[in-house]
Image (cartoon, rainbow, N blue to C red):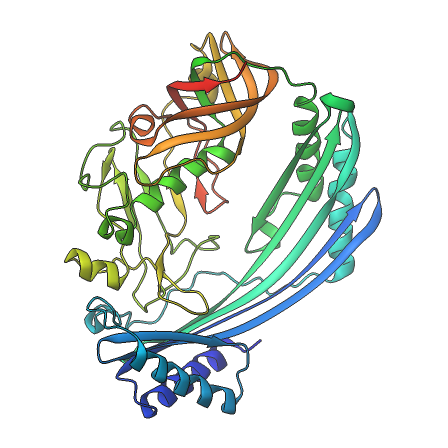
Amino acid sequence: MLSPKEAQERCHALIERALKAGAEAGDAVYIADSSEAVSVRLGALEDIERSESEHIGLRVFVGGASASIGSTDLGDGALDELASRAVDMAHAAPADKFAGLAPAELLMRSAPPELDLVDDHEPDPQTLRRWAEEAEDAARAVPGVTNSEGGSASAGRGVVALATSHGFSGAYAATSHGRSASVLAGTDSGMQRDYSWRSARHASDLPSPAEIGREAGERTVARVNPGRVKSGTYPIVFDPRVGSSLIGHLLGAMSGSAIARRASFLLEKDGAQIFESAITISEDPLRRRGPRSRPFDGEGLPTGTRNLVENGRLTGWLMDSAAARQLGAAPTGHASRGGSGAPHVTAGNLVLQPGAVSCTALLADIKDGIYLTELIGHGVNGVTGDYSRGASGFRIVNGEIAGPIAEFTVAGNLIDMFARLVAADDLETWRGIDVPTLRIDGLSVAGD
């Protein structure tokens, strides 16, 4: 893996080759990752994995057309061939009046902020194994746990670099650490599994392996022998680990490319009130040690804090440069790049801000409801907002969490669901998309 400085230099070298080969403009991106993971099961070593990847991608523009190509070979000869092929491909491609680099006047020119994304301490395999064993041991020690799918611990490092032909150059490194445990409880048809996991840029920001394992065991035991629920309309409470998926659906619908294609359930709703006024959804890609922090986007624009939803109102779309041109607007610094292809839209460190009521108060007036802890399937229509997901969780009876339930479907429409959403005050921020416990009344449930 190259250092950030070396990666920048390699991207510059590829851009220079492309311009000499006949490209009018272009950008190059370098993406590299290395990781090591150790997993154990029933106290024995199960697996040790080490992976490394390194990729450089080139995008060129010729006569209103564009082409992109990538390679895992970073040698001089390979870069020469990459540049030549990309230009030849662009000559054969159809023109696209919206394609092009980001506006030069919007590029990040200042020094990138220090985001503290690198943990200089890299755990050795023995330490990873010890953490994995501690997590599994704690999970198996929970009364009622009958078997284990294992414990694991991992550490990784990545480098991203981007250079453009019109003056941008930047790179950064980031590390990641993770711990998890997954166990089973119960027997025969009543058997259930569950898990717990955490990830962070710095190992010191993680809960102890024992905490993660204990949570996995307790979650699993609570799910044993699930009952069924009758079909009907219920107030639904989303546990934070599944509630964040609702914001993921919102993010996809706010993509400028989806709006330009008229393939979003938020069409004609820019600036509209779609949540209650108590709801604000913020983005902070410059959060120190954030799981989705980055100093610049995939086109070289600076990233920055923003409220995607403020007092319940949408504040605008998330746009890369191509989508912005289609919509007659300016790009918003949300472009993301893979090893090849055009940019797509993403957001960094999204948070649905906590509400004013406790989780206990949120449930207090529910006589008969459902607390969701798992969602299954992908039954969401991004064009209409129709929502239908398989689910499992717990009954809520007279304001209290009751017995486990499974094998039912929750359905509604996201526009209606957002309008009725209420947030508790129990926010924790570590996933990248974080929400407190959420409540939505009047959702349809298909069960028995």
Residue 217 in view, yes or no:
yes
Q: Residue at x 38, y 63 (%)?
A: 295
Q: In the drawing, does residue 89 fall left or right of residue 96? A: right
Q: Residue at x 23, y 69 (%)?
A: 96
Does residue 19 sit above or below 274 in this rendering? below
In x, y percent, where is residue 420?
A: 32, 23
Q: In the drawing, does residue 207 fall left or right of residue 11? A: right
Camera-side residue of 329 and 167 = 329
Does residue 180 sit above or below 186 in this rendering? below
In x, y percent, where is residue 135?
A: 73, 42
Q: For the C terminus, which image quadrant?
A: top right
Q: Residue furthest right?
A: 44
In x, y percent, where is residue 172?
A: 46, 69
Does residue 126 sit above or below 442 in this rendering? below
Camera-side residue of 285 and 145 = 145
Residue 164 in view, yes or no:
no
Camera-side residue of 280 and 268 = 268
Q: For the N terminus, which image quadrant?
A: bottom right
In x, y percent, where is residue 406?
A: 59, 22
Q: In the drawing, does residue 319 fall left or right of residue 18? A: left
